[in-house]
Amino acid sequence: MFDSSSSPSRLQLSCLLVVILAVAAGCDQQLDIMNQPFACDEPSDCASGYVCDEAQNLCVEIGTRLDTGPPLDSSTDASDTTDTRDAADVSDASDATDTSDVLDASDATDTTDAADAADTTDTSDTDDADSGGGEIVPEVIIAASSSATCAVVPSGQAFCWGANDVGTLGLGFTQNLPSEDPVGEVSMTNLGSATFVAEPGAIDGGGSTMCAIASDGNVYCWGGNGELLGSPQAVVDEPTPIANPTGQRLVQVSVGQHHACAVSDSGDAYCWGDHTYGQLGSFGATEDVAELQAVATQSLDPGEVFVEVACGDRHTCASTSQNRVFCWGDNSNDQLAVPDVASTTSVPRVIDSPVWGRTATLTQLDASMKASCAVVDATPVSTHTIYCWGRNTSGKLGALDPGHVLTEPLEVEPAANAANVEFRRVSTNFNHTCAVADDGQIYCWGRKEHKLGTVFPSISGSDIPHPDRPIDGGRQYLDVAVGTNHSCGVSVANEVFCWGHNENYRLGVSGPDTPTPQQVVFPSR
């Protein structure tokens, strides 16, 4: 309980300093912050632009996070961890799957420390990614499909680069872009007055398809999977709305190989596309469903709702408001972590795992071909840990030996070089995984290729089965998204860098394959 008679908080001291500086400068303009009540019992006690932190009985500015609590927002629940994932592209012999990643929707910039806010533009300072007071939400949101990447910027525009032979870039045509201009702006013809949403989890890619949520609350998809796109055409080269008979406003989307799912602002989950393996989680669905189908909820407790959904190639997992994980679809490689399901199930099944329980916070999910991962913030001591389960192709799950099947969630085990590293974001794909550490550096592991972002001269063999060393460049990052043979990250300066194979300019630049992160430059906007 906040005691107004106790020592002043950092926020109060910061506000007092603003007032003193304004008076000293002879400023005649009345500062709004002088009239803000800091103690509160209910939301009406706070002025516009502020919200009441009921745990502390203190008015704080929207988006500000107290050191002892989660970030506050006037319209979203602090436990909302919406974010996005991805899956596989088995139609491409060299690009077998895909995933993307998204930041925790509950993450927020710590505005109580002016020094930290200023440091977010310094890509050479490795001490600012985690100042202990909060996390920074990127302004640029990225997602990767098998051989392409897209980014949504604050203006509501989207830009894509990489392979476009089946319209994955959403440009309104299917020709690949030239080397001198490898980044294109996504068509907004079908969006009307709406724009794309630049929020974590609002865009994702899988296989040869991209899906993104627009400001009208609907999801728009484009690319090469007709059944997933709700279209009889094999190729849809510009964003097309998915039928939403529920009318619910969608806030997070995830794309698999031939299916996709989304979560609404009321906590309902919906899926569409191929239902061959039960991956839509709906009793009434048949194969190739072209509109949103509600995911069955009979396994949820009263009042429990979905928070985030993650689509693998043929399975789906979702986290709930009670910090539980449910999975459904194909379980041939234990990617559901449900031992009594021999093959497939269309009924969401809870993972009975002691590693997180209801005292920990599930901050992010991701899924890929035959595997799933979760980032867990354990309590009472905050420790960010990745747990994965399913097929450990090339050691991408970071536990046991490459090729093993993890029948239950196991903790990712860093190598000796990264023994004390904790991770807050993860993105996994066909045979590699990348994660953002608490200090902002990115670590990648799995198949030892350029997509891991660095070289490992002292490690023999074809795989790097554990997080070992950060990618090259020494930058801090906020998010990461991996395709089949490339990876991309958003830096603290909201710049996008990519590394790995550069076929069809999937790194956003012309040039050879490289493990060195290359900056992607968007067309003038």
Image (cartoon, rainbow, N blue to C red):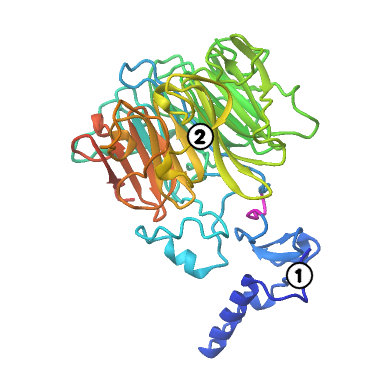
**Residue at figure coordinates x 50%, y 88% from the top left:** 25
Residue 268 lies in quadrant = top right
State yes or no: residue 74 in magenta: yes
Residue 182: x, y in percent?
25, 38
Residue 124: x, y in percent?
34, 59
**Residue at figure coordinates x 53%, y 27% from the top left:** 372
Q: Quadrant of the N terminus?
A: bottom right
The secondary structure that most of the magenta stretch takes on is loop
The residue range painted magenta reads 70-75
Residue 459 lies in quadrant = top left
Q: Secondary structure at mark 1?
A: loop
Specify the amino acid type for callout 1: Ala
Residue 258: x, y in percent?
48, 18
Residue bearing the label numbered 1:
39
Q: How many marks?
A: 2
Give the number of the mark in front: 1 or 2.
2
Residue 290 lies in quadrant = top right
> Circle 1: is it few (<14), some (14-19), or many (20+) Cα within 10 Å?
some
Can you tell which mark lies on residue 59? none
Q: Secondary structure at mark 2?
A: loop
- In this picture, is 245 found above or below 35? above
- In this picture, is 95 found above or below 266? above
Q: Is residue 182 visible to the viewer in this orientation of the structure? A: yes
Q: Is residue 171 visible to the viewer in this orientation of the structure? A: no
- Taking depth in this image into account, of 30 and 42 the one nearest to the observer is 42
- In this picture, is 342 found above or below 376? above
State yes or no: residue 27 in magenta: no
Residue bearing the label numbered 2:
412
Asked if labels 2 and 1 touch by Cβ distance under 8 angstroms, the answer is: no
CA distance separating discs 1 and 2 = 43 Å
- Taking depth in this image into account, of 514 and 203 the one nearest to the observer is 514
Specify the amino acid type for callout 2: Val
